[in-house]
Amino acid sequence: MGLTIGVVGATGAVGRKMQEVLAERKLPIDKLRLFASEKSAGTTLEFMGKEVTVELLTEEVMKDKFDYLLFSAGGGISEKYAPIAAEAGNIVIDNSSQWRMTEGIPLVVPEVNAHVLKGYRGIIANPNCSTIQMVVALAPLHRKYGIKRIVVSTYQAVSGSGHKAIDELEKQIADDSYPNKVYTRKIAKNCIPHIDVFNDNGFTKEELKMVYETQKILESNTIEVNATTVRIPVFFGHSESVYVEFNEKPELDEVYQLLQQAAGVVVMDNPKENQYPTPLDIQNTDDTYVGRIRKDLFNDKALSFWVVADNLRKGAATNAVQIIEAIENL
């Protein structure tokens, strides 16, 4: 018997990518149902050669029987509809930030902490895109050396803000006078050190997500994280410069070995040949790519490296689908 899967927010950038990944990874899907707002309900989307009609999202349809519901329609929609679906006995995998830090709700990156899914039913939170790729690279090192402190700067693609942001960058590239509507500044030919709203402490909401989500996923609230998140004029793929201090001294050869053996990690690091990952290199892939691995000049317990991943795939859609695969394989 195949799976019945629903996608909420099916016409958005991540919702469409979820359907693409579901098809590519060949899950045994018997029925796919797509849900969206009144604006998109009634339209059709193609899935594996068949046209699927987008249904109107209502409380009643969330009470139907699903094996899995993938949510990617924003925190307000998840807050209202995810509990209804979960109370009906469905497993909900939510891509918004609504439930990530809620006690008792798993925050999952399958390569890192799939064990928390065993025996669980209900709402499962998909982490923030920038957090996902960082912890995939950090987890094997944390298990070996123990992480003390992380300093990370992100370089995030506009697709993280959805279709309107992609359209805005395209139009500003073509027309220098096209105004900024999605962002606080023009994004073409620019970079903006401001993703999401500012907190009273001067950090943005996106930066604080990286702090607390990292601690929850790696199961250590003593890890210190200092994040600066930046939007750059790239369409797809987030990049990160990561500095990490460990409790134990890492050996560089062993670090390479640990990363090369880690699930979901691809090491692309040959400085003499200018080999390192960039967003264009890794677009439409599902792994996390690591390069420019080097020991700190002044602290022998610290490393720096460069991490790149496709934010719509591993940073959102693929991670959600991998959660389904992890549950099915437990």
Image (tube, rainbow, N blue to C red):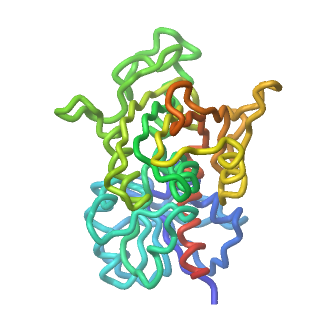
Residue in the image at 71% along x and 57% along y: 261
In the image, taking residue 164 as reference, residue 261 lies left or right, namely right
Q: Position of residue 274 (x, y in %)?
A: 77, 25
Work out which residue is located at the far bottom of the displayed protein and give it: 1
Res. 279 in view: no
**Pick the front one: 322 or 43:** 322
Residue 326 percent across, percent down from the top left:
57, 73
Q: Residue furthest top?
A: 177
120 lies left or right of 137: left
Task: Name the foreground residue: 86 vs 168.
Answer: 86
Image coordinates for residue 196, horizontal then vertical, percent: 32, 35
Judged left or right of residue 72, residue 43 is: right
Quadrant of the image containing the C terminus: bottom right
Q: Is residue 305 left or right of residue 130?
A: right
In the foreground, 328 or 134: 134
What residue is at 42 percent from the left and 59 percent from the top?
Answer: 217
The picture places residue 286, in percent across and down from the top left corner, at 66, 52
Vertical order, 121 against 111 (above or below): below
Q: Kindly identify the residue that appears in the image at 53 percent across and 59 percent down.
A: 143
Quarter of the picture holding the N terminus: bottom right
Most distant residue in the right direction: 273
Residue 245 visible to an observer of this rendering: yes
In the rendered image of this protein, does residue 135 appear above or below residue 208? below
Instruction: Give the residue displayed 59% in from the left and 51% down from the top.
Output: 313
Count the labels in the image. Answer: 0
- Quarter holding residue 238: top right
Of the pair 200 and 247, the residue shown nearer to us: 247
